[in-house]
Image: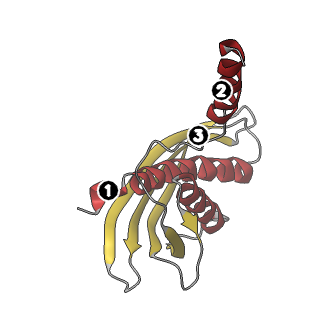
Amino acid sequence: MSKKLKFLLLLIPAFFISCGYKPVYYGNKSSEIYCIKSVKISTPEATALDVLTKNISEAVLSSKNKLECSERTERYIVANVKSIKFEPIGFSQAQRANIFKMKIDMDFTVENKEGKPILKTKIKETTQYVGAGLRADFERRYALEELAHLVRLRVFSLLSNEEEWQK
């Protein structure tokens, strides 16, 4: 066999082996299993409980953790919303509130299996929502979703930086 043929026979398998799929993860964080134990709201806001629970769930999953309430659960999330405030600061031509200033104040706790707090922090967010001047209850619901997105980002940030709060 010639040298060129031997070289090609070695090069072709090496090429196909080197092109194989290999998943790459650039972090060093292993995923934990979380359960949302409770989300408590002291103010009677329509759909607030559902919206906040959904956004906290999305934050857990986005931070490369698992969400499961079973005997395998390692961490439990407790969110206690102390207050949600909506202030209409702008009105449409039809005199419907379409600009809201919103504030949320909540205690966020991550507990271990024994119920001891691993992380305990306050989440306070303030934002404005500018709507289209629809019915006020729709605008208020959309404003609540906007506020819940900020809570999701904060929870995502806390869970992604787990190494810092475990020190």
Which quarter of the figure is the C terminus placed in?
Answer: bottom left
Which residue is pictured at 53% across the width and 80% down the height? 72
Which residue is pictured at 59% across the width and 65% down the height? 53
Horizontal and vertical percent position of residue 67: 58, 68
Indicate the amino acid at tag 1: Glu
**Residue 86 bears which disc, if any?**
none
Task: Describe residue 151's horizontal placement relative to residue 144 as left or right.
Answer: left
**Of the two numbered discs 2 and 3 in the rendering, the one whose residue sits closer to the viewer:** 2
Indicate the amino acid at tag 2: Leu
Quadrant hosting residue 130: top right
Q: CA distance from mark 2 to mark 3?
A: 63 Å
The residue labelled by disc 2 is 10
Task: Describe residue 21's horizontal placement relative to residue 115 as left or right.
Answer: right
Q: What coloring was used for the rendering?
A: secondary structure
Quadrant hosting residue 112: bottom left
Q: Earlier in the sequence, mark 1 or mark 3?
A: 3
Of all residues shown, which one is farthest toward the left? 167
Indicate the amino acid at tag 3: Tyr
Which residue is pictured at 67% across the width and 64% down the height? 47
Which quarter of the figure is the N terminus placed in?
Answer: top right
**Number of marks:** 3
Q: CA distance from mark 1 to mark 3?
A: 34 Å
Which residue is pictured at 49% across the width and 56% down the height? 85
Question: Element under label 3?
Answer: strand
The residue labelled by disc 1 is 163
**Of the two numbered discs 2 and 1 in the rendering, the one whose residue sits closer to the viewer:** 2
Horizontal and vertical percent position of residue 31: 49, 61
Using a 10 Å C-alpha cutoff, classify the residue at mark 2 as few (fewer than 14 neighbours), some (14 to 19) or many (20 or more): few
The residue labelled by disc 3 is 129
Task: Describe residue 123's horizontal placement relative to residue 12 as left or right.
Answer: left
